[in-house]
Image (cartoon, rainbow, N blue to C red):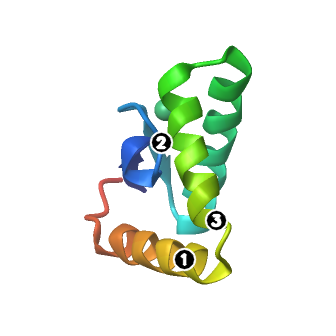
Amino acid sequence: MKTMTCKQLGGACDHEFRAETFEEIAQLSKKHGSEMFEKGDKPHLKAMEEMQGLMRSPENMQNWFENKRKEFAALPDNT
Ligand SMILES: [Zn+2]
């Protein structure tokens, strides 16, 4: 299992996600993001806005995911 924080995944807090694959951790981060969105958490709303700005360009989005995927792959496995 590898660990990444909400902040590392484009979020706003130090909440940690643990997963085996990048796809899995991206899902966890997304779920957490929508929970925070429902709570109306300001820092997360702001972070999401920034992400949405980035996602407007498919190319930027692709780059972002590739970078995060590499970051995830480089993490030590801390089972
Ligand atoms: Zn968070």
Q: Are marks 3 and 2 in contact (CB under 8 Å)?
A: no
Query: What type is the residue that disc 2 sits on?
Result: Gly
Mark 1 residue crowding within 10 angstroms, few (<14) / some (14–19) / many (20+): few
Left or right of 29? Residue 69 is left
- Which label belongs to residue 11? 2
Q: Determine which of the numbered discs, if any, sits on residue 13 in the image.
A: none
Q: CA distance from mark 3 to mark 1?
A: 7 Å
Q: Which residue carries the number 1 mark?
A: 60
Disc on the earlier residue, 3 or 2: 2
Callout 2 crowding tier (Cα within 10 Å): few <14, some 14–19, many ≥20: many
How packed is label 3: few (under 14 Cα within 10 Å), some, or many (20 or more)? Answer: some
Q: Identify the residue at horizontal 46%, vertical 50% (top origin).
A: 10
Corner quadrant of residue 6: top left
Among the two numbered marks 2 and 1 on one chain, the one whose residue lies closer to the N terminus: 2
Q: Give the residue number, with chain letter if any, for mark 3.
A: 55
Q: State the image coordinates of residue 41 (x, y, percent, origin top left).
A: 57, 19
In primary-sequence order, the first of circles 3 and 1 is: 3
Report helix, strand or loop for mark 1: helix
Residue at 53% x, 73% y is 65
- Which secondary structure, mark 2? loop
- In the image, taking residue 59 as reference, residue 71 lies left or right, namely left
Work out how far the residue at label 3 is from the one at label 2, CA to CA, in angstroms.
14 Å
Q: Are the residues flagged by discs 3 and 1 in contact, CB closer than 8 Å? A: yes
- Residue type at mark 1? Asn
Task: Measuring from the top left, give residue 67's x and y in whole percent.
Answer: 41, 76
